[in-house]
Amino acid sequence: MNQTTTQAPQFDSRRFTCAVLCILLGSGSVTLAIQSLFSNVNLATLYVSSTLWQSLVHAWSGQIEPATQSASIPFFPLMGYLLIAAVGTGIIGALLISRICRLPISVAFTEWGCKGFRWWLLPAVWEIFRILAFILGWTGLESLLLATSQFWFSVAIAGWIATFTALILPVSSNTFDPAAEPNQINTAQKINIPFAAWLMMGLFVTLFTFMNWRLYEGLLIPHGDSAMYEEHLWNVTHGKGFRSYLDQGLFWGEHIQFIHLLILPLYLIWPSHLLLELCETLALAIGAIPLYRMAVRHSRSTTAGKAMVAAYLCYFPLQFLDIAIDLKTFRPISFGVPILLFALEAIELKRWKTAVILMLLTLTAKEDYAIMLGPLGLWIAWQQWRESKQISTIPRPTLFKSVAPGIGLSLFAVVYLAFVVKFAIPWFRSGEQVHYVGYFSKFGNSLGEVIQNILFNPSLLWGELVQPGTFIYALALIVPLGFLPLFSPSRLLVAAPIFGLLCLNELAHDPRHHFHAPIVPILCWAAAAGLGNIPALINRCSLKMKALERKASAAQTFATHFLWSSAIATGIFFSLGPLGLVFWDSGSAWYWERLYIPGERARQFSKVALLIPPESKVASTDFVHPRFTHHARSYDYSNYRRKVNDYQSGVPADTDYIVIDTQHPYSEIKKPDQVPEYHNHPEEWELIPDQTNGYFIILKRKSSAK
């Protein structure tokens, strides 16, 4: 129903003046914040490359001091550019609102200017806090404000976009019968996935599969923690065991993780790393299906469901599960995300058998999911207890039975995790403790010490948790979802234990790697529920304030649009994909032309591949290592000492070829005489004549040395 069929707003000269002031002051607000952030190269590179920073400063009539790499940016030229942009978008937005909502242009401009451009004032609030922190000498607070500046801008952009879309596209909340009971809505009505949602999923799969494949073709995907999983499948199908030659033995000495074995039927048809990339991207996209249905059930709006799909696919922590900051593009832990989302939907629908099967399947994605299933079991027990308490005549034995499954799940998760970490993984490591104990070195050198200090040393635990990094990490997870997980606190608490562990993990302080994978489905689940909780929250407040009751629908409309716009806005500053600034910044290490168009190095490698027989045993450096996993043996040539060589330096004795990529990101060897094997034992190795213009060095073991 069109907004104007209810009560159309009337022109108000004071509000019109307010709209003009918001545009003027908003432009000045953003100008002040940009002046502060771009005055120093270290701050500016949070947003753009140093090359682009220099270009922007000069375009804004600024001056750069080479010695300090600081810039002086005059106020008015930059203010002029921003004012032109603000006025232009203000007029265009007003025209669209006027046409769609059938409002006079003056009224449309007033509504858009007052409600939309007040979000442009948020950077001024950030700047005021920063200046106060500087004056008062609160360096910690100032550093925190600077480190979180991207989130302030993200919220401002998201609020601005959400306001506009809320004006032209109100969210209808009568998709389902409002009089229907919640359990009837959950179980009786089938929810079909609309074309728009399928289209968004299709775009995600197409885009990220293309990016992953191009990274592989460009020799930019490392073997360790990425292409080694394809080696697992190759070795299994060729009788070599579930392992890569990076592992200590069987892969279960690293993690109890074997979900990628389910790809084997497809892998037998197409034995390629590209298949694994396609499957992972497709799996992540499919997670949007249960999210759409849960969002619709909670909000009773298909528009909210589509917003949830858009937010999920644009959620930059999800995208980093597909392409990590270090360009590791495949990890089986990602398969747990859609499986857990389907399990959460089954839990809400009380399809317990389905939920149990799916939750068990998540454990095959990595043992980390057990950390999530523990608190999830407590949540299930609490929900069942609440529902049972509403029935006053229910006997106590029945009440106990209702909470027993949830408690049982929690106990199972604890026992499973303890068994895996204490017994299963060490057994496959010949008795050595799990390798990731080293991630918590501040708490001890053994698993027992780490657990003891986490549980019984509150001062150490508190000191490690209560840090700016924890707050920034939380913002990175919550802000892209429009803060909506906060509106379902019980669901959000399910993620608290693993979030705490991630904050203690010395390698996992931001969601740009893979450790946060189990948190993603929980936060998105909480966001979907939060969409439906907002009107109820406002209606509860309206018992004392009748004026709020009329705002429930408007609040849900804004929250729905703020959800997807927050995902897009944060993506501008953090995504490696086309949403992100770095994708288009030619000075950035993640510039699209640098990553997704194979260069000369990849072209030269085609000559190398022809020289290495498939039946040979090859030791190679990291980024070309994935191209030799289908040979008789594929060894890692690096400074790491592997079990396959008895933890000694050099290459295993049965190595036939050594292939060294002189141009890969961590290359230390540039010339043949720098290769220890060739330099120290020239009688054993011959140098294959270079045909690659120095890009690769190939050594072949002499027949007499075998």
Image (cartoon, rainbow, N blue to C red):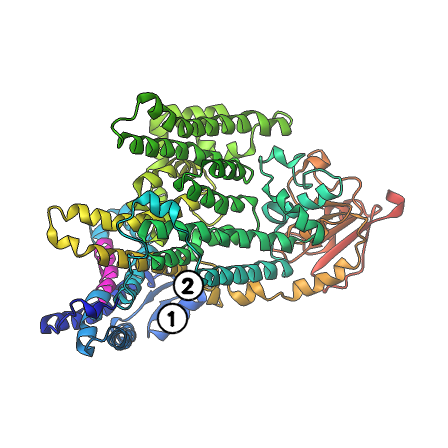
Is residue 501 placed above or below 226 in the rendered structure?
above
Q: In front here: 119 or 370?
A: 370
Residue 589 tag number = none
If the image is split into quadrants, where does the N terminus sit? bottom left
Tag 2: Cα neighbours inside 10 Å, few (<14), some, or many (≥20)?
many
**What is the distance, in whole Å, between disc 1 and disc 2 at their CAs?**
10 Å
The reply to whether dot 1 and dot 2 touch (C-beta < 8 Å) is yes
Measured from the top left, where is residue 333 in percent x and y?
A: 53, 43
Residue at left offset 31%, top offset 48%:
530
Q: Count of labels shown?
A: 2
Residue on which disc 2 sits: 48
User: Does the magenta segment cover residue 118?
Assistant: yes
| Apparent side of residue 619 relative to residue 87 in the rendered image (left or right) | right
Relative to 157, residue 391 above or below: above
Task: Kindly identify the amino acid type of the residue bearing the numbered disc 1.
Answer: Leu
- Which residue is depicted at the point 40% across and 42% down? 349
Q: Nearer the viewer, residue 206 or 137?
A: 206
Range covered by the magenta-colored residues: 117-131
Residue identifier under label 1: 56
Q: Overall secondary structure of the magenta stretch?
A: helix
Q: Is residue 483 visible?
A: no
